[in-house]
Amino acid sequence: MDIIDSIILGIIQGLTEFLPVSSSGHLELGKAILGDNSVPEESLLFTVVLHFATALSTIVVFRKDILDIIKGLLKFKWNEDLQFVSKIAISMIPAAIIGYSYESQFAELFGSNIKLVGFMLIITALLLYLADKAKDTNKKVTFQNAFIIGVAQAIAMLPGISRSGATISTSVLLGNDKTKAARFSFLMVVPLIFGKIAKDVLSGDISMESHNITSLTVGFLAAFVAGLFACTWMIALVKKSKLTYFAIYCAIVGIITIVFSLLNS
């Protein structure tokens, strides 16, 4: 993978991580278009690096919220901040269990399997459409909601299922406020990504010896900058925009992807 390809894929990751259109799905499509022939393990490594970059961009965008939460935790009381962190922890359980148990199976899916991506994008479109029909409320995410949203996040490990789309849609369909659902969705993935990175580094799964460090670095930077822009824009957009536009986009891209894969099979 050369530097230009890394930049393109980094930008794709940064923009699509926060938009409900599946960053993993678009990465696989981008790799297929660019002719990336990486084996699944290499492809997953690059994907993890880019997700790490967008996790950092999330921290930057939500730095005030995170600092307020930390201050609240230091009070050592069962306050709103501790409850929020507890809900985040609960939401991580399904993805942590499924990711740990079926990591190798998921890794095999990240190898330009664009037909699967196409079908999963259509499912994402359906989720967004259903969520768009739900009434907006002032309800906060409950502990039970947090676990269910966590299940949606675990399912979103499949390339083509939008993580933000699945978690925000699930939260909204459970009757939660759209803005609160988006905030919870963006923050809940941060500890999960850092946990995955730490696990891979400690276990030795990530080896830099056989990879182009320059390509990984420029991809990381491209994803980080694009993520800053996309996250900020999405926060403003989710307050006033409808999810139907993203549903239509995912459906169109999904259909085109399936037709393309059939014609080239």
Image (cartoon, grey):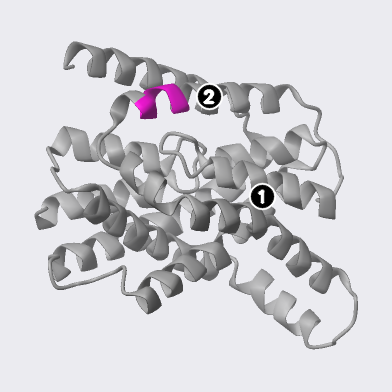
- Residue that carries the numbered disc 2 in the rendered image: 123
Question: On the picture, is 4 further left or further right than 99?
Answer: left
Question: On the picture, is 86 further left or further right than 54?
Answer: right
Name the residue: 74% across, 69% down. 85
Q: Which kind of residue does numbered mark 1 sit on?
A: Gly
Nearest to the observer: residue 230 or residue 42: 42
Where does residue 48 sit, x and y in percent of width and height? 36, 59
Instruction: Please report the bounds of the magenta region as a residue range.
Output: 116-120
Where does residue 255 sit, x and y in percent of width and height? 37, 15
Above or below — where is 52 with respect to 139?
below
In the displayed orientation, state which residue is furthest to the left: 2
Label 2 element class: helix
Residue 116: in sight, yes or no? yes
Above or below — where is 6 with respect to 158?
below
Question: On the picture, is 28 further left or further right than 97?
Answer: left
Label 1 element class: helix
Q: Is residue 118 magenta?
A: yes
Name the residue: 14% across, 65% down. 211
Above or below — where is 203 with respect to 146?
below
- Residue that carries the numbered disc 1 in the rendered image: 150
Residue 225: in sight, yes or no? no
Nearest to the observer: residue 240 or residue 159: 159
Where does residue 200 sit, x and y in percent of width and height? 38, 70
Q: How many marks?
A: 2
